[in-house]
Amino acid sequence: MSTHANTNKENTRSFGKFLRGVKSELKKVNWPNRKELTNHTSVVIAASLVATAILWVLDAAFGFGLNLILK
């Protein structure tokens, strides 16, 4: 039967092992440089603006159509 102290010690070891694993995995990440980051950010912003415009047009069209039907 394990005691509370043993369980706490095991949790501390496993947490330390987890953090070492995280550090190891982060070293493997291919981080983008500034040019790539700027490019990806602009693509996301542009796609968001396009999606917003499409949804706005659809909302206005359906609202206009609904107003015609209800009157």
Image (cartoon, grey):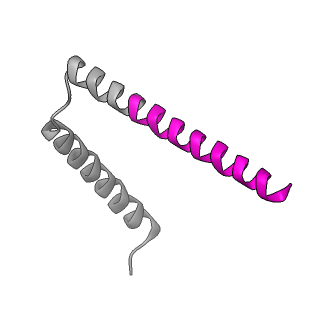
Residue 17 image position (x, y, % from top left): 24, 52
Residue 33 image position (x, y, % from top left): 19, 21
When asked about the image quadrant of residue 37, the answer is top left
Residue 20 image position (x, y, % from top left): 22, 45
Q: Residue at x 74, y 55 (%)?
A: 66
Q: Quadrant of the N terminus?
A: bottom left
Residue 51 image position (x, y, % from top left): 47, 40
Q: In the current view of this chain or complex, which residue is farthest to the right?
A: 71
When asked about the image quadrant of residue 44, the answer is top left
Please count the marks in the image.
Answer: 0
- What span is in magenta? 46-71
Q: Nearer the viewer, residue 28 or 60?
A: 60
Determine whether, in the image, residue 37 is placed left or right of residue 1: left
Specify the principal SS of the magenta part.
Answer: helix
| Residue 62 higher or lower than 27, as above or below | below
Q: Nearer the viewer, residue 32 or 68?
A: 68
Q: Nearer the viewer, residue 33 or 41?
A: 41
